[in-house]
Image (spheres, rainbow, N blue to C red):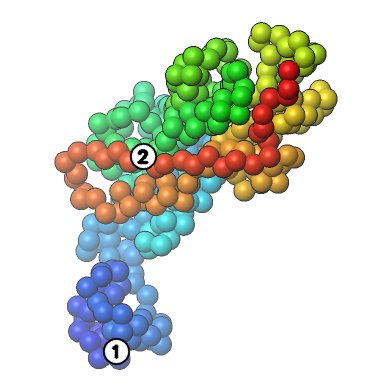
Amino acid sequence: MADVAARAGVSGQTVSRVVNGSPRVDPATRARVEAAMSQLGYRPHRAARALRTGRTQTLGLVVSTLETVGNFRMLQAVADAATERGYAVTVVTASGADALVDAFERLHDQGVDGAIVLNEATAIARGATLPSSLRLVIVDSAPDPRASIVQSDHAGGARAATEHLLALGHRTVHHLAGPADSFAAAERERGWRAALEAAGAAVPAPVRGDWTSASGHRAASRFADAAAGDIHTPRADAVTAVFAANDQMALGLLRGLAEAGLDVPGRVSVVGFDDVADAADYRPPLTTVRQRFDVLGERAVALLAEQDPAPDAAVAATVPTELVVRASTGAPAAR
């Protein structure tokens, strides 16, 4: 560090500020110090810094699975946000309460500065003993005094999707719901139900899936049976619109409806949730609710990177969602 300071013509304290990302360095000086660091091959020593500061610049990430699109996208978002702040990420998986406790113990032993618990793992965390010595951020959870919470406005997004379909003239909207133990699925179901009740529309029993496109495909037969028939003399429970709790299930649903000979959106309109990268390339392009995974990841990392080691109170942050209208929704067929 002394060599860098001499090469750049600054004090050792200024070099330290540049290394630690302090805003108290003007851009020209920062550029001169960074050039000197590059020329001399200087790199901060994480272990030495951890001994001095008590922080390892490493965050833990706890997941139950990486097979779901939501978990994978959140992993990418957290990794990107951590990299921007100079943090490394350690990923551990936990499939039950005991495994979750073991995961926290492993992260604690590695000296992480805090941990982020993702999506489905939050259901496990609700019934588990969480370590008081480890700062936690939980993504998608009911309020928990033991941790800070970051979540999308699932209910608001689901309500917007349902209101969109009702505004097109559909008498009611059926729901392809997510797993019963998922907080996000429950919130999306709550928003769907609230929109129907506010409009005085019938509230059909949800059909439950497991987030996979295969479960959407299996559910399609149930919706197709109620959507088939003479469009001029429709059944009272006829399906003309379905709100799927995620895009993957919507994809399977689109395939199943097509196999049943039902045009989307001519006979059945479909809305998803997430706005995955391929949603615009579904056939037809999918109307969906966009989640800002990048913002969720940044908020979660920021809470661990910026808060004091012993915060006085947990923080709750809700990230807005956005309805993206494409070609999978339209007015119901003329009757």
Instruction: Determine whether, in the image, residue 146 is placed left or right of residue 126.
Output: left
Please say whether residue 158 is visible from this viewpoint: no
**Residue visible at 28% across and 84% down in the picture:** 29
Nearer mark to the viewer, of 1 and 2:
2
Quarter-of-image position of residue 179: top right
Quadrant into which the C terminus falls: top right
Would you name the residue on which mark 2 appears? 318
Mark 2 surroundings within 10 Å by alpha-carbon count, few (fewer than 14), some (14 through 19), many (20 or more): some
137 above or below 201?
below
Task: Tell me which residue sits at (46%, 40%) in the image.
Answer: 321
Calculate the distance from the C-alpha at mark 1 to the C-alpha at mark 2. 44 Å
Q: Which of marks 1 and 2 is nearer the N terminus?
A: 1
Rendering coords of residue 182 (x, y %): 48, 26
For label 1, the residue is 8
At a point 35% along the width and 28% down the height, the residue shown is 142
Q: What's under tag 2, amino acid-wise?
A: Thr
**Outermost residue, top direction?**
236
Q: Position of residue 19 (x, y in %)?
A: 30, 73
Say left or right for 262 vs 155. right
Instruction: Give the tally of numbered discs.
Output: 2
Q: Relative to 233, is 44 on the left or the right?
A: left
Q: Is residue 334 left or right of residue 155?
A: right
Q: Identify which amino acid the numbered label 1 is placed on.
A: Ala
In the rendered image, the residue lying farthest to the left is 312
153 or 303: nearer the viewer? 153
Q: Is residue 11 above or below residue 22?
A: below
Q: Is residue 199 visible?
A: yes
- SS of the residue under disc 1: helix
Q: Nearer the viewer, residue 86 or 323?
A: 323
* Residue at horizontal 47 percent and vertical 23 percent from the top: 195
Residue 94: image location, x then y, percent: 47, 34
Quarter of the N terminus within the rendering: bottom left
